[in-house]
Image (cartoon, grey):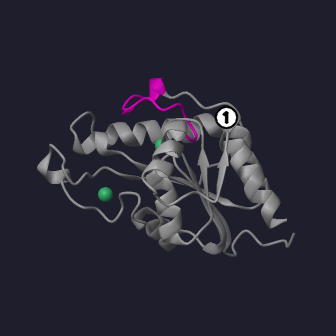
Amino acid sequence: MKQESPTSARPAAFLDRDGTIIVEKNFLGDPAGIELLPRAAEAIKLLNARGYRVISVTNQSGVARGYYGEEAVQSVNARLVELLQEQGAIIDEIFYCPHHPQADLPEYRKECDGRKPNVGMATRAMAKYAIEIEGSLMIGDRAADIQFGKNLGVPTVLVLTGYGRAERERIEDEHLTPPDHIAPDLFAAVEWALDRRS
Ligand SMILES: [Mg+2]
Ligand SMILES: [Zn+2]
C-alpha cells in the first residue's frame, strides 16, 4: 500500500450514523440514548489505521419534524465522537441535515441538497478536508445511503444492522439502486472495502 503524508488527499469512508455506527433509536435527540453497535469502534479504528478520513453523514429530519432541536443533534454527535475517541476510534466530523421536504416546521421545510440521497453533505466534507474520491466509499443501512454513494460515484455497502434487513428487501422489491456489497455489520463492510483495495 502506498504511504501518504497526513496533509495529502486521502480517500474517505462516508458512514451513516443511526443503524450503522449506533443502534437505530428512531429519532435520537438525547446523548444518553447512544449505544454503539458491536464492532463499530473497531471498524473505525481499522479505517483510521489504513489512512481513511472518516466522515459521518446523517439525515436528522427529527429537527424538521419538531422532535428535537439542532442543539440536540449536535450534542448527540459530540458525545458519539467522544465515546468513539475513548475507544481509540477517530471520526473526523459528523455532518447532518435537519431538513425535510414535508417538515412541520416551516424554517426546516425544503428539498435540501444535503439530505441523502443528495450529496450535499459530501460536498461540504470535500470542501473542508482533502478527500480523494478514488478509493472512497459509503456504508449505510438504508436505500438512501446506497443512492447517496451511487450519486457520489463511490462503492456502497448496505449493512444489515438498523433498518438494513428491511431495506435489503425493499431495494429488491422496488428495484432501487442495489449496493455493491451487503455486510452483516460495519466491521464486515470495512473489511470488504479494504480487501478489495489491497
Ligand atoms: Mg441509518
Ligand atoms: Zn439540509
The quadrant of the rendering that contains the N terminus is bottom right
Q: Residues within 10 Å of mark 1 (few under 14, many from 20)?
A: few
Q: Which residues are magenta?
A: 20-33
Q: Residue 2, how many percent across, how many down?
A: 85, 73
Judge from the rendering whether residue 109 lies leftward or rightward of residue 129; answer left or right.
left
Q: Main secondary structure of the magenta part?
A: loop
Decide if residue 129 is in sight here: yes
Q: Residue 27, how many percent across, how many down?
A: 36, 33
Q: Residue 108, how many percent across, how many down?
A: 20, 52
The quadrant of the rendering that contains the C terminus is bottom right
> What's the amino acid at mark 1?
Glu
Residue 76: within the magenta? no
Judge from the rendering whether residue 43 lies leftward or rightward of residue 33; answer left or right.
right
Residue occupying the far top of the picture: 32
Q: Secondary structure at mark 1?
A: helix
- Seen at 46% across and 57% down, the residue is 175
* Viewer-nearest residue: 72 or 184: 184
* Viewer-nearest residue: 26 or 47: 26
How many numbered marks does the figure carry? 1
- Seen at 84% across and 71% down, the residue is 3
Q: Residue 145, how many percent across, how many down?
A: 49, 54
Q: Indicate whether 116 appears above or below 120.
A: above
- Seen at 59% across and 68% down, the residue is 154
Q: Can you identify the residue that label 1 sits on?
A: 86
Can you tell me which quadrant of the image ligand 2 is in?
bottom left
* Viewer-nearest residue: 124 or 189: 189
Decide if residue 88 is in sight here: no
Quarter of the image for residue 60 reads top left
